[in-house]
Amino acid sequence: MNTKQILVIDDEDDIRQLIQTCLEIMGGWKVLTATSGNQGLLLAQSSQPDAILLDVMMPDMDGLTTFQQLQANQTTKHIPVILLTARGRTTDQRLFTQLGVRGIISKPFNSQKLAVQVAAALN
C-alpha cells in the first residue's frame, strides 16, 4: 500500500507540529511541512503531495495568495487544498468553495478528529 503524502503549510510551529503528529498517527499520512507560502510552493512543486493543508492567515504571503499561486502553476494545480482558518464566517466559506478549495477546517480544530476531517474533505 502506498502511503499518502500531505503538505502542511502553517507559520505557527506548535500548530504545524500538532497537525503533523495527528495526521501521521491517526491518519497514517506521510507529512511534509512548510513554514511559509513561498516554502510551501517550492515543496508542492518538488514533492507533488496528494493534498495540501494550508493556513489562511500567514505573514508575507497569506493562504489565499498561496492557493492562487498553486492554481496558476501547471505542476501543482491538480493538488487538492484544504484551508485551515480561524475565519469561519459563512461568506468566507462560500468564497473559498467558489475558488475551488476542497475543504475548510476551522481553527481551533479538534486534534482527535483532524485526520477524519481531512479524509472526509478529500473523499
Image (cartoon, rainbow, N blue to C red):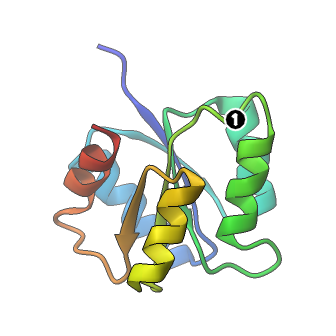
The one nearer the camera, 81 or 97, is 97
Give the quadrant of the N terminus. top left
User: Where residue 102 appears, x then y in whole percent?
Assistant: 44, 49
Q: Nearer the viewer, residue 51 or 72?
A: 72
* Residue at position x 35%, y 39% in the image: 29
Q: 72 left or right of 34?
A: right
Q: Is residue 36 visible?
A: no
Residue drawn at x 57%, y 78% is: 12
In the rendering, at what x and y percent does residue 100 appear?
Answer: 54, 50
Which one is nearer the viewer's eye here, 117 or 92? 92
Quarter of the image with the C terminus is: top left
Q: Is residue 48 above or below residue 93?
A: above
Local secondary structure at mark 1: loop
Location of residue 108 in the rendering, given as x and y in whole percent from the top left corner: 34, 83
User: In this picture, is 122 found above or below 117?
Assistant: above
Q: Is residue 9 left or right of residue 118?
A: right
Instruction: Tell me: 9 left or right of 123.
Output: right
Q: With respect to residue 92, does 74 lie above or below?
A: above
Q: Which residue is mark 1?
A: 76
- Residue 115 visible? The answer is yes
The residue under the point 81% across, 58% down is: 38
Kind of residue at disc 1 = Thr
Number of numbered markers: 1
Instruction: Give neighbour class at mark 1: few <14, some 14-19, many 20+ (Cα, 10 Å).
Output: many
Q: Residue at x 40, y 64 (%)?
A: 104
